[in-house]
Every structure is written in structure tokens, then in C-alpha cells.
Amino acid sequence: MIINYFNLFGAEDEHYPWFKKAQTTFELSCVDMRDVQQRLEKVGFFTKEQQIIVPVKILTKEWSALLKKRFWSNLSGFSDKELNYEISLLDFGKQKYLHFNDHLSLLIASKDACMWPLSIG
């Protein structure tokens, strides 16, 4: 079993190029991995944490389109007007591409100790 959450180690580590209100709603939606890990271990799972950092290169226009489409669930509470306003305030200058790291945090859990050490990536 692999439980896949974005940035369970702390939302403040995220480096998505989005507006402050989006960051705030993202932080509120994060799950505490340590709590999930403790609960799994309490019922007999062996667990391991792993972080994978994925370099992202995306066209600035594509990034803006993803924000407008509410690609992330934390953007669902914004009205069209508010979302368009916040996106208009983002200053990407004349950059054709945006570069940032996506932090993928994994909690790997198994009832079978023979699977250890298990690693992804």
C-alpha cells in the first residue's frame, strides 16, 4: 500500500508559483503524515516515509490555464472573479517557462516485513 500525499512534511516547503491565498488553502488541506503513520503502525503496518522531488518545467500560459481550471482542489473555493484577479496579480515577467520543484511525499505501508527496505523511484 502506498499512501500518496503532497507535502505531508509541511506545506511551507511547497514552492508552487501561485498566489498567497492558494498557498493558505493548500496548507489547510495538508494531512499530518506522522498521525497517519502512527495509526497504520498501531494496527500492524510497517511504514516508511519517502520524499521525491520532481523538477517541473511548464509554459507560463499552461500554468495560468491550470490555475484557472482549478487543477488543485484547494482552488475550488475561489469564485471565477476572485481567481482571475489573483492570477492577474502573479508576476511572471516575460518568462516563457516556469521552473520549480514539485515535492511528492509518500508514506509506504505494508503488513509484510519481508518487503523492507522498500523504495520508490
Image (cartoon, helix red, strand yellow):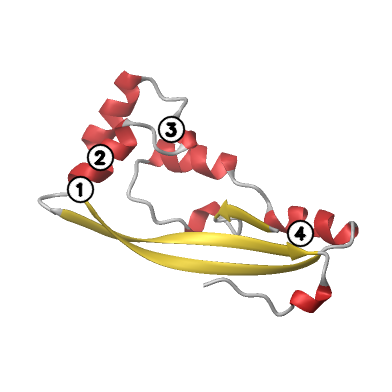
- The image quarter containing residue 37 is bottom right
Q: Position of residue 63 (x, y in %)?
A: 27, 45
**Circles 3, 2 touching at the beta carbon (< 8 Å):** no
Measured Cα–Cα span from mark 4 to mark 1: 37 Å
Give the residue pinned by disc 4: 37
Residue furthest left in the image: 94
Q: Secondary structure at mark 4?
A: helix
Relative height, residue 60 to residue 104 (above, below): above
Residue shown at the point (73%, 58%) measured from the top left: 34
Circle number at residue 60: 1
Direction from residue 36 to residue 5 in the image, left or right: left
Direction from residue 92 to residue 16 in the image, left or right: right
Give the residue pinned by disc 3: 75
Q: Secondary structure at mark 2?
A: helix
Point out the tag, 3 or 1, that comes first from the N-terminus.
Answer: 1
Amino acid at dot 1: Thr
Point out the tag, 4 or 1, that comes first from the N-terminus.
Answer: 4
Point out the tag, 3 or 4, that comes first from the N-terminus.
Answer: 4
Q: Position of residue 72 (x, y in %)?
A: 44, 39
Q: Residues within 10 Å of mark 1 (few under 14, many from 20)?
A: some
**Circles 1, 2 touching at the beta carbon (< 8 Å):** yes
Measured Cα–Cα span from mark 2 to mark 4: 35 Å
Amino acid at dot 4: Gln
Circle number at residue 64: 2
Measured Cα–Cα span from mark 1 to mark 2: 6 Å
Seen from the viewer's position, the closer of residues 13 and 71 is 71
